[in-house]
Amino acid sequence: MNNLQRLLLFFLILFISLEGKGQEFSLQEKIPFDSSIRTGTLSNGLKYFIKKNIKPENRVELRLVVNAGSVLEDDDQRGLAHFTEHMAFNGSDHFAKNDLVDYLQSVGVKFGAHLNAYTSFDETVYILPIPSDDEQIVDKGLTILQDWGGGLLFDSEEIEKERGVVIEEWRLGQGAQMRMVQEYLPVIFKGSKYADRLPIGTKETLETFRPEVIKRFYGDWYRPDLMAVIAVGDIDVDKMEAKIKTHFSEFVNPANPRPREEIEVPDNSEPLVAVASDKEATNIIFNIMYKSEAKDLATGEDYRKGLIQSLFTSMVNQRLRDLLQEANPPYLYASTSIGSFITRSKSAFSCFAVPRPDDVEGGISTLMNEIKRVELHGFTSSELKTEKLKLMEAYESAYKERDKTESESIVNELVGHFLEKEPVPGITYEYEFTKKYLEGITLEEVNTVIGEQITDDNRVVYLTAPDKEDVKLPTTTDLLAWVQASDESAPNALKESILDDQLIKTEPVPGKVVEKSRIENLDVTTLKLSNGAQVFIKKTDYKNDEIQFMAHREGGISIAEDVNYWSASFATNIVGLSGIGDYSYTDLQKVLAGKSVGVQPYLSDLNNGFRGSASPKDLETLIQLVYLYFTEVRRDETAFQSLMQRNMAFLSNVMSDPNYYYQDQMAKILSQNNMRGGGIPTVEDLQKVDLDDALAFYKERFASPGDFSFWFIGNIDEEILIPLVEKYLGSIDSTREETWVDRGVRPPVGMVDKKIYKGTEPKSSVNLIFTGDMEFRREEAYYLRCLSEILDIRLIEILREEKGGVYGVGASGSAGKTPYENYEFTVSFPCGPENVDQLVESTLDAIGKIRDEGVTEENLNKIKEAQRRDQELKWKTNNYWMNVLKIYHINNYDYNEVSWLDQRIEDLTAEDIQRVAKKYLNTESFIQVVLYPEKGTE
């Protein structure tokens, strides 16, 4: 061994010893800030955070965070924090009206999908993901943030135009939920400004405010000492820091700034109680919250307490989920959490349940009794062990992906850090800390959490429910009595439960790989097993700790005769909630604790199969689960009754919601009332579901792996995977080939104009559907999609920006080969009932102009650039490769022509789009379905 080799060996040993030793922590020390993040404060008080992160490549996530939201509005400004956000896209120092959106679309950034913003009670956040491989684009991006922060123009004409858009957004939020919120909010936020500062504001203010009023809000609160600029992505940190200083150093705070106070939610010695009901509500929802003062996570001890609370809520929630498996479950859903109570100064232990309408008291009492059981008896050691395994697995998975973390995730952490002082130590610290301290957390420590959270004062109790004659609602006195009864109850302790974790009890007889080949240009290995199964394997490095899995076979629910349709439709839901092998559904979740694995069988109309994923270390468990779903599904009458009872309870009142009713009616119209048309099932439909028929149908569709094609994509070692595939997927002989059955579900032909009347709010929903037979071609399907993207741009310009008649509008175009060759093109938007006719006319005019005049080169280039940028990212994800390989296989496409997916973008012409518009969008023959409020309520 020479000296260089000895030196290298020395450093290798040193590295291994340091890795084994881990990072040293002191619980008394402050949680460190991630040293890989560049942070600073300009002389004007503006903070910035910058981090280089290469996932995804050639992208940067930019944010402008303003520590000001609706709770800071004056009485004459209700809704103007949010309106200010809208004006950020309507003219600024460097971008005239529409120029900002036009520019961003030209570089592949979509309005809404990428470019966005949100306003809440306490903050406003502007979201701008842009390409980072062009310095000019990055500079423009920072100029946009600069204008948002200090250069909005608030042109009076643009304000008037935008009123309609914001009022349409306000209209979207109206309905049963908002009416009930307005009832209970003043009660539960009694004495706080939060009670009357919903971010959307009031219609009166939105319609009548003067420009100087919104300018006053902007001048008071959009100032550098309340702002942060965040940049995370594939960037040079030094250059980005210099650019931020150039763009934002000249910002000046007001001479006499208004104090940015934290708005309080007062304490209450007596419970705050509210009951609100509405005829259009669908479910009963009960909430109880125990308020407390929020505490900053500052030290290692605080972080450890956070781990204890996480274990506590996970164990409570597992118990609540276990009760859902009863044959007559006490509620449709229940859960707890510990966290923010709207305001940053308050936290709360929150418990909520969705009781069954026929036993409201039973559902609420069950939730409260389970909380009391924990208070009296605590948890068991096996429960703690299970949740520790789950929690540690989550940290391990995140740590393994530390160099593949998406920039958006890091940005969101930094937004929370700036606004709410959430610690950002980095995943290495969090993983090492958790690894060191999690095991030492005792059962006694977890059991003390509930005593810290439940108090006699600071209680908030409220319930929302449908207003129905056959549902007897509790009074506020009833609610308090039920809570009090639970406080005085004495439920027994749960018994310890120890489970065997060996999934496979009898080892299968392996099959063999009989053919092995390569798709060289795609770096894919293909296998044919002795039972006929086909397997496709692609190793990637897009994620360190991920393997995506899919299986496919033609057939699906279409094979079921009408008499068995509903049983077939619920078959995989029943199997999924019944467990497999020796394990019930809840037992299976506990046995899998500490493993990063999940798989579910599915049955769609025309095919069936599996979807799943796993960490490489849990690959065998994934394939074992698939094997058991083929061979050992359970008949669990209790789980079946639970599923049916919960669905019946939900469906009993779902049609009171105008949106559900509209969707159901539209499905019936499009399928000409065919039972397979995708409408919402009724209680009577559910009563047709038979457990044994459902299981028999499932077993026929999943009789043998040999009837399926399988895909494994991700961080795969073929030498490990192939023997597992042979052992489990090759072990059962094939049964038979089958394909889907065309059951004749077809849309109506010719012009159809249907008006649906439901609900009391003055709001409408519009769907225009162009559909029919076609001779399927891949290129044609792509052109239809491109037409929808062009129309999206035009309709936003016309219906939103010019007419102020909608908040959002969407077009979608597609074509399919099965069960018959067809196309469908849909335009949908919500609006005021009084505007339906003119907006439909404007939509048809826009379609007509594309048919007659074509599309502009400017808009063509916008969608092409957006597609290029999207495609760059898609090729670096396991899911996209999974879908590509599956589509090419089942359609018999040539794998050597996968490059067509990129080339089609370059080959796309304006003529292609105009041609499909002429061919498929006949404005004299289409389906129009519009929701109106019930007659007499407009």
Image (cartoon, rainbow, N blue to C red):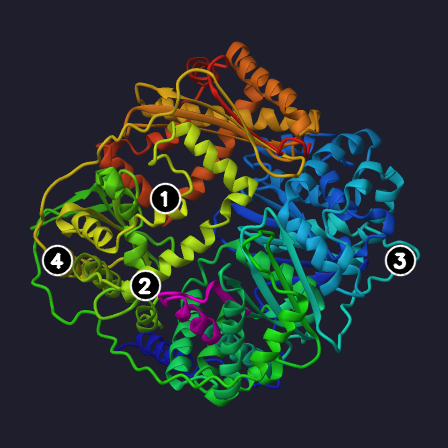
Q: Position of residue 364 (x, y in %)?
A: 54, 69
Q: CA distance from mark 2 to mark 3?
A: 61 Å
Secondary structure of residue under mark 1: helix
Residue 643 sits in quarter: bottom left
- Name the disc covering residue 726, or none: 4
Q: Which residue is mark 2?
A: 639
Amino acid type for the residue under numbered disc 2: Ala
Q: Nearer the viewer, mark 2 or mark 1?
A: 2
Amino acid type for the residue under numbered disc 3: Pro
Magenta-tinted stretch: 315-336
Answer few, some or many: residues within 10 Å of disc 3's Cα (few below 14, many 20 plus, some between 14 and 19): few
Please name whichever residue, 289 or 554, is drawn nearer the observer in this view of the structure. 289
Residue that sits furthest to the top in the current view = 852
Q: CA distance from mark 3 to mark 1?
A: 50 Å
Q: Quadrant of the N terminus?
A: bottom left
- Residue 319 located within the stretch drawn in magenta: yes
Q: CA distance from mark 1 to mark 4?
A: 26 Å
- Residue 849 located within the stretch drawn in magenta: no
Q: Are marks 2 and 1 in contact (CB under 8 Å)?
A: no
Q: CA distance from mark 4 to mark 2?
A: 33 Å
Of pointers 3 and 1, the one earlier in the residue sequence? 3
- Name the disc covering residue 257, or none: 3
Can you see residue 713? no
Of pointers 4 and 2, the one earlier in the residue sequence? 2
